[in-house]
Image (spheres, rainbow, N blue to C red):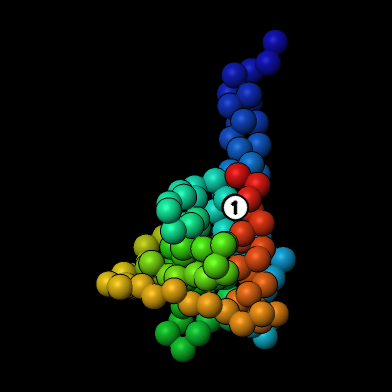
Amino acid sequence: MINHKYKFIGILFLSFFLIGWTKLSTSLPNNSGDLYIDRNNSPTSDEGYEFWVIQDFYIEDEFNDISTKSLVKYDCTNNAQKIILFSNYKTHMAEGKPRHIFALDKPQWFYPKNDSQASNILKEVCSFAVEK
């Protein structure tokens, strides 16, 4: 008979890999870090898909931040994106309490140029949105 304690631990361990952040194949500019999206918590609206995005840097910036977490809306039909809010963290993977949170009053759509890094990220995120 399986001990319920170990069964519970096994379920938690498995859920860690099934739920949470997915690393994108596109990295940050100049290979300065990695990008992750939360594929499991992404609401849709008339304007497109919203994803939580983490930028996890290899080295700290001038404010000693090592990661950011943003809520980004992606319009896959018109190849556009806009940042709704973002926060800075002194820990990897945006864990713990944010150093600062920025909520944009009137976020504007940004249309990345074809074959730019931002365009590649948009295409990759939209491929996840289509899978949903």
The residue positioned 48% from the left and 77% from the top of the image is 110
Q: Is residue 7 left or right of residue 108?
A: right
Task: Say if 49 sits above or below 112 in the image.
Answer: above
- Amino acid type, label 1: Ala
Task: Say if 50 sits above or below 18 in the image.
Answer: below
Res. 95 visible in picture: no
Q: Position of residue 18 (x, y in %)?
A: 64, 41
Res. 74 visible in picture: yes
Q: Work out which quarter of the rendered image holds the C terminus and state it.
A: top right
User: Farthest residue toward the front?
Assistant: 78
Q: Position of residue 41 (x, y in %)?
A: 49, 47
Q: Position of residue 2 (x, y in %)?
A: 68, 16
Q: Which residue is mark 1?
A: 129
Query: SS class of the residue under badge 1?
Result: helix
Q: Position of residue 106 (x, y in %)?
A: 30, 73
Near mark 1 (Cα within 10 A), the count class, few <14, some 14-19 or many ≥20, is: some
Q: Give the image quarter of residue 99.
A: bottom left
Task: Say if 108 sits above or below 6 in the image.
Answer: below
The residue positioned 57% from the left and 69% from the top of the image is 79
